[in-house]
Image (spheres, grey):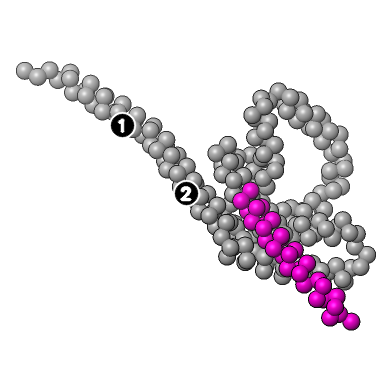
Amino acid sequence: MVNSNLFPSIEATGGESSTESRRKKPRISETEAEIEARRINEESLKRWKTNRVQQIYASKLVEALRRVRQRSTNEPDKVVSVAAREIRETADRVLAASAKGTTRWSRAILASRVRAKLKKHKKAAKKSAGNCKSRKAAATETNRIKLPAVDRKLKFLGRLVPGCRKVSVPNLLDEATDYIAALEMQVRAMEALAELLTAAAPRTTLTGP
């Protein structure tokens, strides 16, 4: 004769195992997400090393710099430092556009222009809240002293990479790796443009009026 008390215990055990399996599912999905993020990061790194991407970036940069130069000729009183900052921001925006919004840092650079316009409307409010800002800076300095060395370096890295102040460590490292590769491509493209301009300068002076 089979004891009927065994069946509830079997059902209870089955329920516990199903609960455990449900708990383990997020871990599996997180691992798959990390693998997918790593794959995308590897593809983006390969993309920044290709000559085609460098040539496309260089051509777009030249077009953008021509527009900046046209605006500067219309505004002869513009300070040199302001013009230099505008050129640097233009180069960064073209670089972010080359990433096609696939990374956090590129989206942050593209959105920085909109944020700059909003900051102009909030200058008066910031002046009235100057004391509050100084207290917040003091609290931030205190927290920086308490943080371990690794956390301080990660926090500093998050400030260097646009849009990565509040991301997880794996995402920060992926974004930083992609951002560094993009900056290396930017340097190569600018060096190539500088060589072309240097080679064309003597001919321009000889053939000029």
Circle 2 residue = 39
Circle 1 residue = 18
What residue is rendered at 70% in x and 41% in y?
159
Image quarter (top left, top right, bottom left or bottom right) of the N terminus: top left
Q: Position of residue 186 (x, y in %)?
A: 67, 57
Above or below, 137 against 162 in this view is above
Q: Position of residue 49 (x, y in %)?
A: 57, 56
Tell whether position 18 is magenta.
Answer: no
Q: Position of residue 208 (x, y in %)?
A: 86, 80
Residue extent of the magenta highlight: 180-209
The front one of 95 and 186 is 186
Asked whether residue 64 appears in the rendered view, the answer is no
Tell whether position 188 is magenta.
Answer: yes
Task: Residue type at mark 2: give it.
Answer: Arg
Secondary element at image label 1? helix
The front one of 11 and 148 is 148
What residue is rendered at 49% in x and 46% in y?
38
What residue is rendered at 46% in x and 47% in y?
36
What residue is rendered at 80% in x and 76% in y?
203
